[in-house]
Every structure is written in C-alpha cells, then in structure tokens.
Image (spheres, rainbow, N blue to C red):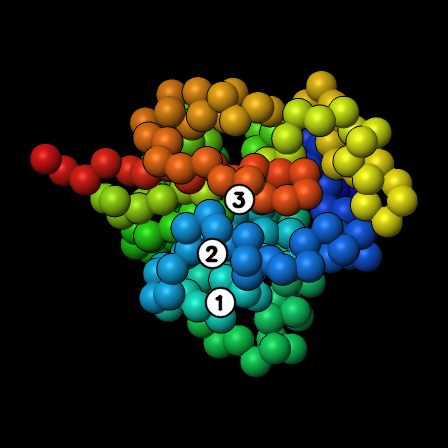
C-alpha cells in the first residue's frame, strides 16, 4: 500500500488516471500559468505518474522527476520514454531531502496536489529553498478550500477531504516560514490555485 512507504505524505495517493486526466486536460497551460519558462532546470516534486512531467520536459532544459513511490516513478518513466523524452532524470527519494537528490541548484520546483498532505510544510519549503538557485521559483498547485462534495470530476467528488484543504493564505504562510517569498497567485480552474514563491538573490 502506497501510504505504508516510510516518508510518504499521507492523503496524497496518486488518483486513477481517468479522472486525473479529465481534471487536467491542459497540463502545459497549468505549468505556464504558474511560471514555467523554456530552458529552465526543473524538479517535478512528488511527480506521481508523470502527467505534468511530460509537458515540463517539452520546454525545460532538464527535468528531475522525484517521487518516494518507486512504482509511480516507473510509470512516469514509461510515460516519458514512450514519448521519446531524453532530458529527464528519475529519482526515488524523500521530498524533505530534496537538496541531496539534485546534483546542482535548479531554477524551478513544481508540486501539484501534494502540499496539503505534508506534515511539516515549512520544513519542506526550506528543503526546496536549499535546492533552488538564487532567483529560482517554487510553484505549488493546491485545491481551493471548497467543500469536497462540490469539486466533482466525471460526476464524483474528488480531491482531499475538505478539512485538509489549504487556503492561499495558509499555503503562503507555511512557505514563507521556510524562507521563500510569495510573488504570484493565479487561478487554476476549475478547483485549484497556483502559488509561486521566489528564493531571494544575494544583495
């Protein structure tokens, strides 16, 4: 069982691909809205089966797909290999240890639908800050705090339990406590928001 993996963030299991892909018909558009730009070095953190990793790889110079679940990482690798992608590295590891999982600082860390399940969110933000180059960005896509029964996909309620959902203010407070600064909030229809944070450049 996925949640039995040591270090796994609870209530962040990868959903079935059918409704996940129905929810995100344009993952490239989500990435662009949250700040991904061509030529970046990117980490797809808690990448799951690679639904966002593939469009990241299409524009990034290099992408590192990281997940603690080796089976999901293998699914992501199959997805990208099937598309002929050659600029992606796959790493099984704990998100809290991010800085030790990348060989050099990156420009952009992307995390979708997992931040709500992180037990110590400022600690994760600190780990991301350590992995970012100065001026680099951390983009988080989270479910809005709408009641779960109202966030339906393919006719059924989807996403984490209502009480686990984080407001943009809660997300910002936790990440800023880890040393990053909020630079932009965007709507990600139909049920999400994106929050982008920056690592300060040396003065």
Foreground pick, 167 / 179:
167
Q: Residue at x 77, y 47 (%)?
A: 15
Toward the right, the furthest residue is 155
Q: How many other residues sit within 10 Å of disc 1, few (<14), some (14-19) or many (≥20)?
A: many
Toward the left, the furthest residue is 203
Q: Residue at x 71, y 26 (%)?
A: 146
Toward the bottom, the furthest residue is 84
Foreground pick, 80 / 104:
80
Residue 14: x and y, percent? Answer: 72, 46
Q: How many other residues sit within 10 Å of disc 3, few (<14), some (14-19) or many (≥20)?
A: some
| Residue where numbered disc 2 is placed | 32
Residue 106: x and y, percent? Answer: 33, 52
Q: Is residue 172 above or below residue 132?
A: above
**Label number found at residue 111:** 3
Q: How many other residues sit within 10 Å of disc 2, few (<14), some (14-19) or many (≥20)?
A: some
Q: Quadrant of residue 4?
A: top right
Task: Give the mark nearer the N terminus: 3 vs 2.
Answer: 2
Spatial CA span between label 3 and label 1:
15 Å
Residue 54: x and y, percent? Answer: 57, 66
């Amino acid at each position: 069982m996925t949640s039995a993996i040591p270090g796994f963030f609870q209530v962040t299991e990868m959903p079935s691909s059918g409704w996940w892909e129905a929810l995100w018909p344009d993952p490239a558009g989500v990435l662009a809205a949250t700040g991904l730009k061509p030529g970046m070095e990117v980490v797809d953190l808690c990448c799951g089966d690679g639904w966002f990793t593939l469009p990241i790889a299409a524009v990034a110079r290099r992408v590192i797909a990281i997940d603690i679940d080796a089976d999901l990482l293998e699914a992501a690798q199959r997805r990208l290999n099937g598309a002929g992608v050659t600029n992606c590295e796959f790493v099984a590891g704990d998100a809290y240890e991010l800085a030790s999982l990348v060989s050099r600082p990156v420009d952009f860390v992307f995390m979708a639908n997992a931040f709500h399940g992180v037990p110590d969110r400022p600690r994760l933000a600190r780990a991301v800050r350590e992995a970012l180059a100065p001026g680099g960005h951390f983009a988080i896509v989270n479910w809005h705090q709408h009641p779960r029964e109202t966030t339906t996909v393919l006719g059924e309620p989807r996403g984490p339990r209502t009480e686990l959902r984080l407001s943009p203010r809660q997300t910002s407070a936790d990440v800023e406590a880890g040393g990053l600064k909020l630079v932009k909030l965007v709507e990600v229809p139909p049920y999400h928001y994106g929050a982008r944070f920056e690592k300060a450049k040396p003065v």
